[in-house]
Image (cartoon, helix red, strand yellow):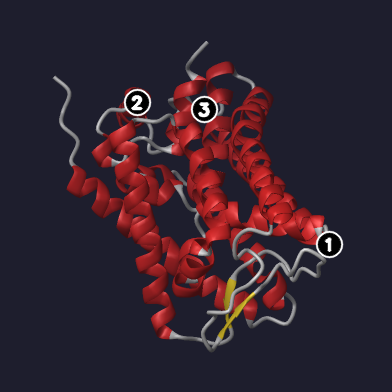
Amino acid sequence: MQEKPNYLKALGGAALIGGVFGILGEALLMVYAATPLYGQGLSTLFVLGTLGVIGSCLFIAGIYPKFEKFGGMGAVLPFAGLCAAFAGMTFGVGKATGSAAKGALKVFIELFLKVVILGMIICCIVGLIVYFTGFGTVFTAPYAPAGVVVNQVGPPNGTAAGPPMGVPTGIDGLAFLWAFITAAVISMIAQIILMLTKLKLPTYLVIIFVVGAILTPFGVMKAIVVFGGAGLQVLTIGAGEAVVSTFNALLGGNPLPFIEVLCLFVFLYIVGVGGGLIKYAATKGKGEVAGAGAGGNEVAGANADAGTGGDAGAGEITAAHEGEREAAQP
């Protein structure tokens, strides 16, 4: 008899891990925004890129799969989790087939094309509707409080300032609290929906991506980012707003912000696949189980849970483990 999911444990884990990533993102954002080399214009991109590198490195060390098992969607939603998913599938397929190149190709098809690119296409369709109907508040942010600069995409004739982001102009202790709360609440909501619907993780990530795009013209995403700062932007749901906003900038005559967002996803793919290849090379010939984490029975058990839906309450439906599960399929 299958064990009943522990909802309290799952939600608590998702809130904790997601909230920690919110704090980490806010700290990185403050550092990059204060650095003349990056400034406020590029700070968001560097924060998300840095999180991707962190996720890949933690995967190589066998740590990130443990975050996923404990925190569920709190570990999957951050951009670090996206890189861990890329790395997990690359490594898993490589171990199962003996070919790291096949792992990289499968990641490109199953995750980069079917999740990232598909999500971007749907978000661009939303952006087209917003642009040509003039519906929504994607172009304005009148409620930005003092001390926060919200990059605006500008009117349709327009001049874009880059991917939308609430960028702190100084150090504010409360900003870390709001970032934690924002990321924690979103992660809990995502976790409970996953547990109730049993959606496949790649499909669910596309839906989350698109939800961010749909909420953008209603001003919901901008309001959340003004409240929670990096607590929203470190999560993949924030990418939906970024695509809609920067695509509107492209239609308005400024393609650079959209190109920056696309380059970010390409960078994350390269970093994630690179992490999987490094782990594959490091473990090749050592007889390790095709898995992401501490090896042996722990990995096998986690993979089984990911494949069946298992104890979703324990957060075991994870990005990297999903990749490994698919690696074992013919």
Between discs 2 and 1, the one toward the N terminus: 1
Residue 92 in the figure: left or right of residue 152: left
**Does the image show residue 285?**
no
Identify the residue at image location x=75%, y=55%: 258
- Give x and y (percent) for residue 169: 59, 85
Q: Amino acid at mark 2?
A: Ala
Give the structural element (helix, strand or loop) at label 2.
helix
Q: How many residues crowd mark 3 within 10 Å: few (<14), some (14–19), many (20+)?
A: many
- Give x and y (percent) for residue 257: 76, 61
Identify the residue at image location x=66%, y=30%: 104
Q: Which residue is disc 1 drawn over?
A: 254
Residue 92 in the figure: left or right of residue 165: left
Q: How many residues crowd mark 1 within 10 Å: few (<14), some (14–19), many (20+)?
A: many
- Give x and y (percent) for residue 160: 77, 68
Q: Which residue is disc 2 drawn over?
A: 300
- Give x and y (percent) for residue 185: 34, 59
Along the line of sight, the residue nearer the viewer: 326 or 134: 134
Closer to the eye: label 3 or 1? 1
Identify the residue at image location x=18%, y=49%: 8
Q: Amino acid at mark 1?
A: Asn
- Placement of 126 over or under 105, stated as above or below: below
Give the structural element (helix, strand or loop) at label 3.
helix
Between discs 3 and 2, the one toward the N terminus: 3
Most extreme residue toward the top is: 330
Q: Quadrant of the N terminus?
A: top left
